[in-house]
Image (tube, rainbow, N blue to C red):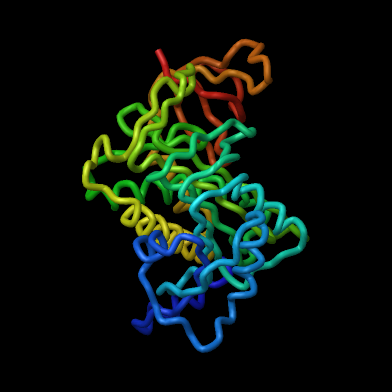
Amino acid sequence: MAGSSAGAAARGKGRTTTACLLSDDAAAAATLLPPAAPPAAAPDEAAARAVWRALGDREAPAVGAFADDFWRGACLVAETGASQFDALRALLAGGFRPPGPLFTLAGEGRGCHGQRGRPWASVAGNLHFCAALRPAGLPATQALALTMLPAVAAVEAIAAAGDGAARPGIKWVNDILIDGRKVGGVLTAAQSVDGRIDWAVLGIGLNVAVAPAVPPTPSVPAVGCLADRSPGVTLRAVLAALLRSLARRCGELEREGPAPLLAAYRAASVIIGRPVAVWPEEADGSGPPARGVVRAINADLSLTLAGVPGPVRAGRLVLGP
């Protein structure tokens, strides 16, 4: 990822660089990110301000800095009126190119959504995170690695922040579960140019302190939060672990390609060896599901189900029996 090589060099020298921080929530900024003295000139402030403007019509932010050797900027907003993911995606699609990895974090707000625009309940105390990345030369043929990246990072962050008390897993394709309850979900959008990924946007929502009141569905029968299994977990710890995991996995992807991510995704899966039904994604839910025990998650993230001819590539998965 752009910036990851420089970050690795900084880590190798045992020093930490300073990143631009814009915020309209001073208390959250001081609590959530390691403070740093702003440099005399913040070279990445212009990029951070472009992201800030894309997040909607809001007051001018307070400008600060935080210590990091991978992320180059962050925007923290107390409340968002629309999807951060959609705002970043539109900004990048319109030609904006950040000088390095940037992220946004909202305390709460409206317009958050998951896959195919499904609404995501935003509650204060939970994590509502998006990142803009520029993969360093990643071939477009390996774009599925960017689907696995936020899911794997989320699972690793939960385990690290909770000191191992919670055992999170990934339910195909992008749900994060603990004890069968959905505690998070991830999104990815990317664009390629001349056979290479030019930019990517990651969205990660995690129920840290609160389990929102969400009506049960066959694919999401129950919702939970990290505090259910790790009562002492904090949003700060989860964010710090997530930022570390994303930085490490981005560097790994640049150096080694998608194989380590695929191995980690498979290892975190909660569906391998279990009976499932995969229903079509059509709006009316019509059509018979593919049913069978999951034998494998293939390199293209399709599923091999016992008794089902051919791979299953898309749909809403319901855990058996």
Residue 212 vs 78, above or below: the answer is: above
Left-right relation of 86 to 296: right
Q: Quadrant of residue 165?
A: top left
Given residues 11 and 82, the one toward you in this image is 82
What residue appears at the point 34 percent right and 36 percent down from the top-left corner? 225
Left-right relation of 197 to 244: right
Q: Position of residue 266 (x, y in %)?
A: 42, 40
Given residues 158 and 271, the one toward you in this image is 158
What residue appears at the point 59 percent right and 81 percent down from the top-left corner? 43
Q: Quadrant of residue 31?
A: bottom left
Given residues 190 and 235, the one toward you in this image is 235
What residue appears at the point 58 percent right and 18 percent down from the top-left corner? 279
Specify the quadrant that holds the C terminus: top left
Q: Quadrant of residue 92?
A: bottom right
Left-right relation of 94 to 78: right
Specify the quadrant that holds the N terminus: bottom right
Residue 32 vs 154, above or below: the answer is: below
Pick out the residue farthest to the front.
59
What residue appears at the point 62 percent right and 64 percent down from the top-left corner? 134
Q: Position of residue 35 (x, y in %)?
A: 37, 73
Pick out the residue farthest to the bottom.
40
Q: Position of residue 72 (x, y in %)?
A: 52, 71
Residue 216 vs 59, above or below: the answer is: above
Tag count in the figure?
0
